[in-house]
Image (cartoon, rainbow, N blue to C red):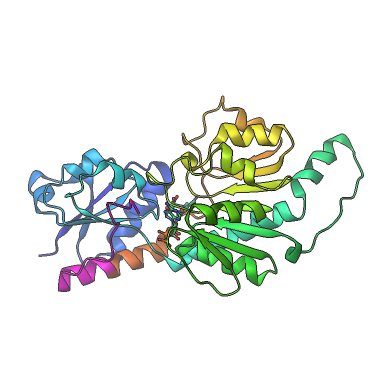
Amino acid sequence: MRPVIPFVSESEGVEREAWISALPEGLQDIGVVKPFADLTEDERRAAKVAIVANPSPAEVARLPNLEWVHSLWAGVERLASELPPDGPKIVRLTDPQMAATMSEAVLAWTLYLHRDMPRYARQQPRKIWLEHALKTPDQRTVGILGLGKLGSASALRLKANGFNVCGWSRSPKQLDGVETFSGASGLSDLLARSDILVLLVPLTDATRGLVSREEVARLPKGASLINFARGPILDTAALVEALDSGRLDHAVLDVFNTEPLPADSPLWSHEKITVLPHISAPTITHTAVKIVAHNIRRYLETGEIPESVDRIRGY
Ligand code: NAP
Ligand code: GLV
């Protein structure tokens, strides 16, 4: 008999509907995918693996015999902080298509900043005809915090487009043509040379508040910032102060402390901030379903669980 595989998610609307139609079809040879609310008591007890998309940890806890959960998201900070350390293993989504999508977004918004688009957009309603000096990409250094699946793909894509690229990670890394840094002094060095800073580290105890007032102050005058990671990694008040004082030029924010960004947030109307609704690298349903199906099939056949989150490091 095919096992029942719970699907646990707090996503709503189109996203939820997409998963509820794609998962059962993509896994039909392997098991029966059922939303958490439709599970019987016996099915909840029997489940050894569940598929999750930003789930309520309380619902995951109501599947008492889970060995692991397969996330449809790359960032799993909520599960990592709320599931007990001896709870199910957490396997996050690692999808080459997501890395390609994120690197496309990093390139697109880097070009937006590099070609001074926010400045020209501000000039238009004021009918200002004013040209600003053009820099070539090799005169611009982009610093990336996080050189994992998404950060390294982004670094290589920026490099291929002529930018000077440097990156920072927890452990030392080598990446073709990219100057790499690690550790606290490495962070200072990277910040000091980043004309555009891109945040792509996971949210953990060590990265919460990582880009605080002190780090923002280390960026060169006129620098810009892109946060595609998670809101709490960045001190938003320090960012806004630096933008208001003219020290920093512009920020592109895709992630926030509270999402959706509340309607009364001043960030919405700040002329030096571009607000995006967490869209830089959404999970692509058709590629993700194939990866999830492959991983769960292998587990059911061999017992092998894919590489999971290190619960001490938090990612
Ligand atoms: P990943 O492969 O796990 O890479 C994480 C990188 O961050 C690694 O290079 C890691 O260093 C580094 N890092 C972690 N903690 C650090 C610390 N304390 N100090 C310095 N470096 C640290 O993660 P990923 O797949 O690239 O994803 C990164 C994040 O992007 C996700 O966690 C998620 O929050 C975010 N994301 C956002 C969107 C969006 O649409 N906005 C979409 C997908 C993902 P090591 O190499 O030494 O391990
Ligand atoms: C999206 O933010 C993800 O973590 O996959």
Residue sitting at x 56%, y 63%: 154
Q: Nearer the viewer, residue 151 or 143?
A: 143
x%, y% of residue 262?
A: 52, 29
Within the displayed image, which quadrant is ligand 1 positioned in? bottom left
Left or right side of 37 for 287: right
Write down the region rendered in magenta.
Answer: 295-315
Q: Nearer the viewer, residue 188 or 2?
A: 188
Does 78 appear in magenta?
Answer: no
Residue 250 vs 31, above or below: the answer is above
x%, y% of residue 69?
A: 24, 55
Q: Quadrant of residue 1?
A: bottom left
x%, y% of residue 201?
A: 47, 53
User: Split into 4 quadrants, where in the image is the C terminus?
Assistant: bottom left
Left or right side of 176 for 137: right
Residue sitting at x 60%, y 55%: 189
In this view, which residue lies farthest toward the left?
A: 42
Q: Is residue 304 visible?
A: yes
Q: Is residue 29 visible?
A: no
